[in-house]
Image (tube, rainbow, N blue to C red):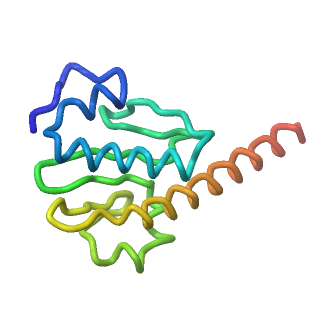
Amino acid sequence: MENNKAGFISIDEYIATFPEDIQKILKKIRATIKAAAPDAEEKISYQMPTFALKGNLVHFAAFKNHIGFYPVPTGIEKFKKELSVYEGAKGSVKFPLDKPIPYTLISKIVKFRVKENLAKAAEKEKLKNKK
């Protein structure tokens, strides 16, 4: 799965670089995120599909043996128990391609990140208005 290193312009372009079976998974992850965060903007950031709403919400990417999902450290920490069956790091988790992708869990994490970003934005706005 060699990706275009020159840079992607859209998530569609990114997804199109993968084999059909991986494209299906990526499209379903994208739809899951869209459903959980309908107001989020799609973009490419760090050469990965990204959803943003008052800042980055989540990134995802396909690799040879897994899907990388990046909900920032707070998204990992909040769902630590559910994510404990997957390999991961401080701000990322690997969903192996030889196991079912946990779309419901992805949705829960995205909804959490939406609330988190909106709360942070509201707090910033409150502080700004105090000045």
Name the image quarter holding residue 121. top right
Q: Is residue 9 above or below residue 53?
A: above
Task: Report the quarter where the N terminus lies.
Answer: top left
Exactly how many numbered labels are in the figure?
Answer: 0
On screen, residue 8 versus residue 55, left or right, reads left
Q: Position of residue 27 (x, y in %)?
A: 33, 43
Viewer-proximal residue among 15 and 54: 15
The residue positioned 33% from the left and 77% from the top of the image is: 84
Q: Position of residue 131 (x, y in %)?
A: 88, 37
Q: Position of residue 42 (x, y in %)?
A: 47, 33
Viewer-proximal residue among 5 and 123: 5
Residue that sits furthest to the right in the current view: 130
The residue positioned 50% from the left and 45% from the top of the image is: 34
Q: Is residue 82 above or below residue 64?
A: below
On screen, residue 22 versus residue 26, left or right, reads left
Name the image quarter holding residue 113. bottom right
The residue positioned 57% from the left and 61% from the top of the image is: 112
Q: Position of residue 79 (x, y in %)?
A: 46, 72
The residue positioned 71% from the left and 53% from the top of the image is: 119
